[in-house]
Image (cartoon, grey):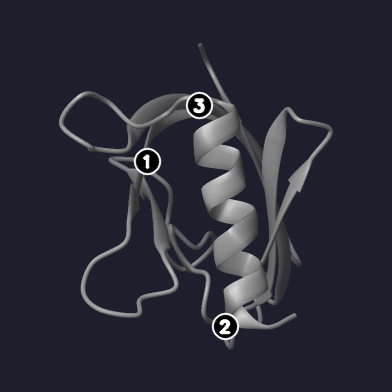
Amino acid sequence: MKSYENTSELKEFIVAKKLRDQNSNIIFNANIKLETAEHYTEIEKEVMVRFDGYNTAGKLTILESGLDPYEYPEDFDAKWQNFKFLDNEYVQIKGKHPNEKIGNYILKITPIL
C-alpha cells in the first residue's frame, strides 16, 4: 500500500471519530490490541497522532505504554506500515519489524469516546 493511501486511511479515522481537539491536537484514549510474532496484549492507553512537517505521511504513537520495546513496537509511521480504517470503528496497522520477537504484527486501535 502506498503511503498516501495509509495517510488517507489515518486521516479518515481521525475525522470520522472526531479525534482532533480545538487546538488541532490529536491525543486520545484507546483500547489497543497488539499481536506480534511471539506475544499478544490488550491495553488501554493514550495515543497521539502527528502530521509534522511538509509532506509527512503521519505517525501514530502509543504514549507511556509500559510495553517492553523488545517485544512490542510503539511508533507506527504511515510511510512504512499499512493503515486501514475498518468498520467505522478502529484503525488497523500491519507491519513487519526486523526484531524476530516482534516480526509480523497487527495492531487495532479503538478510541474510547
Q: Amino acid at mark 2?
A: Asn
Q: Residue at x 21, y 74 (%)?
A: 53
The residue to which callout 3 is attached is: 30
- Are the residues at dot 2 and dot 3 in contact (C-beta closer than 8 Å)? no
Q: Earlier in the sequence, mark 2 or mark 3?
A: 3
Q: Position of residue 20 (x, y in %)?
A: 34, 32
The residue to which callout 1 is attached is: 65
Q: Secondary structure at mark 1?
A: loop
Q: Earlier in the sequence, mark 1 or mark 3?
A: 3
- Are the residues at dot 1 and dot 3 in contact (C-beta closer than 8 Å)? no
Q: Residue at x 52, y 15 (%)?
A: 112
Q: Amino acid at mark 1?
A: Ser
Q: Residue at x 21, y 24 (%)?
A: 22
Query: Which numbered mark, 1 or 3, is in the foreground of this view?
Result: 3
Q: How many marks?
A: 3
Count residues near mark 1 (Cα–Cα under 10 Å), then give few for <14, some for 14-19, many for 20+: some
Residue 81 in sight here: no
Q: CA distance from mark 2 to mark 3?
A: 26 Å
The residue to which callout 2 is attached is: 99
